Amino acid sequence: MINVTQTTAWYLLHKIRILYKQDDSEAFYGEIECDEVYIGGKEKWKHQSMRTPHTQGRSTKTKTPVFGMMERSSIVNKNGEPEFMSYVRAMVVERTTKDTLMPIISQFVEEDSTVFTDELNAYNGLSTIGYNHKICNHGSLQFVVDGKVYTNNIEGFWSHFRRMINGCYHNVSDEHLQSYIDEAVYRWNTRKASQTERFIDMFNKSIGLIVTWDELKLCEVG
């Protein structure tokens, strides 16, 4: 539409995505949902003989794990009434083990928060490091406990993210996956903002930022 090559368009979009980089200056507090998702690795269109064995579920043989945390919060709407709002932070991780996820939660979630998770063993021990840990066992079809213990909100974010990838970009390489996650997180966290508010925020983020082609290709932008 703007009469540029695909390479130029890719470069422009990735320069914009750098502005979406997540801000880790404030920790989450209160009620936090944690969950993981696995991106890529679809092999249903491959011939049976070409498929990688044992890639179901949480296998990372052909998929990239992404870990997310969502704070349940609220805002005051235009009518002056409280309205539910949630904020998310998500990142590519090497694996979804306790050694990987526990330090991330400790870094981004304040102590004394209530943390809602599924039954993944990596979350065992949260109660011993200062969190009120609540579990819903998805393996036993236990999706909501006591009307409050669930991870439905963070799973809703994963659904939005998958639709963004499948519907808009179709395929995303592992080396640039984090920048697409950053975009999805920014869109989610500012979904109540007006387009003007978003534009002003993006403009302020862009002041003084210089990005080269080599930095994008090498994924070295901080």
Image (cartoon, grey):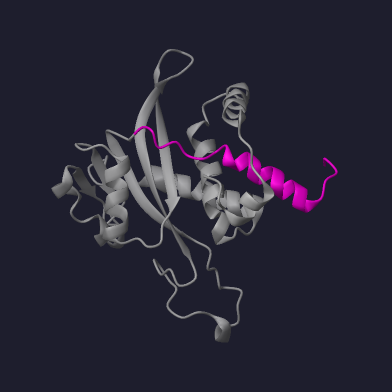
Residue occupying the far right of the picture = 3
The spot of residue 44 in percent (x, y) is 56, 73
Number of disc labels: 0
Residue 36's place in the image compared with 81, above or below, is below
Q: Residue placed at 50% from the left, 79% from the top? A: 52
Q: Nearer the viewer, residue 180 or 208?
A: 208
The spot of residue 158 in percent (x, y) is 47, 49
Write down the quadrant of residue 75 in the picture.
top left
The spot of residue 153 in percent (x, y) is 40, 42
The residue range painted magenta reads: 1-26
Q: Is residue 21 magenta?
A: yes
Q: Is residue 134 left or right of residue 83?
A: left
Q: Nearer the viewer, residue 120 or 139?
A: 120
Q: Is residue 3 left or right of residue 198?
A: right
Q: Nearer the viewer, residue 123 or 141?
A: 123
Q: Is residue 17 magenta?
A: yes
Residue 56's place in the image compared with 201, above or below, is below
Q: Residue placed at 61% from the left, 74% from the top? A: 45
